[in-house]
Image: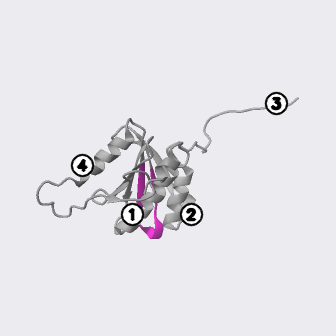
Amino acid sequence: MTLLVAGCGGGSIRARPAVCKLKAQEAVARDLGVHTDDVAYAKSIANNGMPQCAFKARPGGRKVVVTVNVDNGPQPYFRMLRTVDEATQIFGVPPPGFHAPVGVSGLGPFASWFPNQDHLMATNYELLLTATVAWPHSGQGAQMRLARAAITPYFGHLRNAAKAKSFP
């Protein structure tokens, strides 16, 4: 006679939240030059009511956090376009330190880096993804590269990923 016993309880194994993709954790680790186990992750709900995942690491002793917000609300393409359009509108003299969004190719229509907020936004017609980088004393190029690394895996499983990547 075979007896199968199963139970739940106080084990230390916990399921990975769906919003905290393993491939994103691996991409962040690769970009930062650390082992995947050195990148912690935590799921939360953002102020827009959507799930997000914060990936945290300390390469060279410096704290780095990249938070990916996964917004599956209606009309992501329209909202992406509107966000970029509004961020470029300046009436009169630009305020000191103003920087318009920078287009990012290969991440869908109107994908943009917003230098004043240190975040990258992209859409694939199904999701509006925002990767915010907190990395003190790093350059814009390094922040953009990290945001791109973190956001790219979220396009992989979606049916319109090929369509989104076909844009410049």
102 left or right of 147? left
Q: Which mark is residue 86?
A: 4
Q: What's the amino acid at mark 4?
A: Glu
- When asked about the image quadrant of residue 137, the answer is bottom left
Q: Are marks 2 and 3 in contact (CB under 8 Å)?
A: no
In the depicted view, which residue is nearer to us: 165 or 26? 165
Instruction: Estimate the x, y position of residue 3 in percent, counting from the top left.
Output: 82, 30
Q: CA distance from mark 2 to mark 1?
A: 19 Å
Q: What's the amino acid at mark 2?
A: His
Query: In percent of the image, x 24 and y 49: which residue is there?
Result: 86
First-in-chain label (4 vs 3): 3
Looking at the rendering, the stretch of residues picked out in magenta corresponds to 54-68
Q: CA distance from mark 2 to mark 4?
A: 39 Å
Q: Nearer the viewer, mark 2 or mark 4?
A: 4
Instruction: Estimate the x, y position of residue 67 in percent, counting from the top left.
Output: 41, 52
Query: In percent of the image, x 38 and y 67: which residue is there?
Result: 141
Q: Nearer the viewer, mark 2 or mark 3?
A: 2
Q: What's the amino acid at mark 1?
A: Gln
The residue identified by callout 3 is: 3
The residue identified by callout 2 is: 35
Q: Which mark is residue 143?
A: 1
Q: Residues within 10 Å of mark 4 (few under 14, many from 20)?
A: few
Q: Is residue 61 magenta?
A: yes
Question: Circle 2 sits in a helix, a strand or a loop, which is it?
Answer: loop
Q: CA distance from mark 1 to mark 3?
A: 54 Å
100 left or right of 108? left
- When asked about the image quadrant of residue 100, the answer is bottom left
Q: How many marks?
A: 4
Q: Quadrant of the N terminus?
A: top right
First-in-chain label (1 vs 3): 3
